């Protein structure tokens, strides 16, 4: 079972979004039969079987084993992944294209980059799994509080300079390609003999406010009216 499976097929994406099937996928984190699932989700076994067949046909559920019980064969199924993520490929005709925005201060460009990351990582994970190889990846996630908008702008500028410096230091220009630089978040150049091109994306955006924090701020604002 994969930790996360990226869904690219539009029909599979549609099947996974059905509330009942989403619940079934959640329950199938552990192997179970249709009878066991029926008791958990509160539906007739025949109805559960209908949904299981649909999920199995799209490769979202897999057979673990078959158990003989008298004249009946019980199928034990399991979800193919613990979690699922729908790739922009499933909406290819309307998926965002990072080349359309190309502005490091654009929130829409950030979304387009995130969509491309999901798409590319989904293909890489699937390829690595098929080849039975480990996929090398790296990510940093954290939060930073800026005192002022000017501090945030200064940080973004220094971060861009630092990343560009690192790209210039480690980018192999054996292929003759130029560095992508930090301003466009692109992969650094081409692939030299024996080298492997990597995608580099650095993002910075405001953190979402917790519901309690949002309520407190709203009450405070109303008190100042």
Image: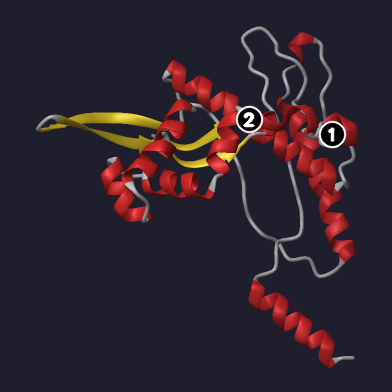
Quarter of the image for residue 192 reads top right
Q: Position of residue 73 (x, y in %)?
A: 19, 30
Viewer-closest of 85 and 58: 58
Q: In what element is the residue under mark 1? A: loop
Eyeballing the image, is 123 above or below 145? above
Q: Is residue 31 visible to us here? A: no
Q: Are marks 2 and 1 in contact (CB under 8 Å)?
A: no
Q: Position of residue 197 (x, y in %)?
A: 68, 20
Eyeballing the image, is 136 above or below 150? above
Locate the N terminus by quadrant: top left
The answer to whether 157 appears left or right of 60 in the picture is: right
Residue count near mark 2 (Cα–Cα under 10 Å), binned few <14, some 14–19, many ≥20: some
Q: In what element is the residue under mark 2? A: helix
Of the image marks 2 and 1, the number of the one nearer the N terminus: 2
The answer to whether 121 appears left or right of 214 in the picture is: left
Residue count near mark 1 (Cα–Cα under 10 Å), binned few <14, some 14–19, many ≥20: some
The residue drawn where x is 24% and y is 29% is: 65
- For the residues marked 2 and 1, what is the alpha-carbon distance in whole angstroms? 30 Å
Quarter of the image for residue 49 reads top left
Q: Position of residue 45 (x, y in %)?
A: 32, 44
The residue drawn where x is 86% and y is 68% is: 148
The residue drawn where x is 41% and y is 19% is: 132
Q: Any mark on residue 184, and which? A: 1
* Residue located beneath label 2 in the image: 10
Eyeballing the image, is 156 above or below 187? below
């Amino acid at each position: 079972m994969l930790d996360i499976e990226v869904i690219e097929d539009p029909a599979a994406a549609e099947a996974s979004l059905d509330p009942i099937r989403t619940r079934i996928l959640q329950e199938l984190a552990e192997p179970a039969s249709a009878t066991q699932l029926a008791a958990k989700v509160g539906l007739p076994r025949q109805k559960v079987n209908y949904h299981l067949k649909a999920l199995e046909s799209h490769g979202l559920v897999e057979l673990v084993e078959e158990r003989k019980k008298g004249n009946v064969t019980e199928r034990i199924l399991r979800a193919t992944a613990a979690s699922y993520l729908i790739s922009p490929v499933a909406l290819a005709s309307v998926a965002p294209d990072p080349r359309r925005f190309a502005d490091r201060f654009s929130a829409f460009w950030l979304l387009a980059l995130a969509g491309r990351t999901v798409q590319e990582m989904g293909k890489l994970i699937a390829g690595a799994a098929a080849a039975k190889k480990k996929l090398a990846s790296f990510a940093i996630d954290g939060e930073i509080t800026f005192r002022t908008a000017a501090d945030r702008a200064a940080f973004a500028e220094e971060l861009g300079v630092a990343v560009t410096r690192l790209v210039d230091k480690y980018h192999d220009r054996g292929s003759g390609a130029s560095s992508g630089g930090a301003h466009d978040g692109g992969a650094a150049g081409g692939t030299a003999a024996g080298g492997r091109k990597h995608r580099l994306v650095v993002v910075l955006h405001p953190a979402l406010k917790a519901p309690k924090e949002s309520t407190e701020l709203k009450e405070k604002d109303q008190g100042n009216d």
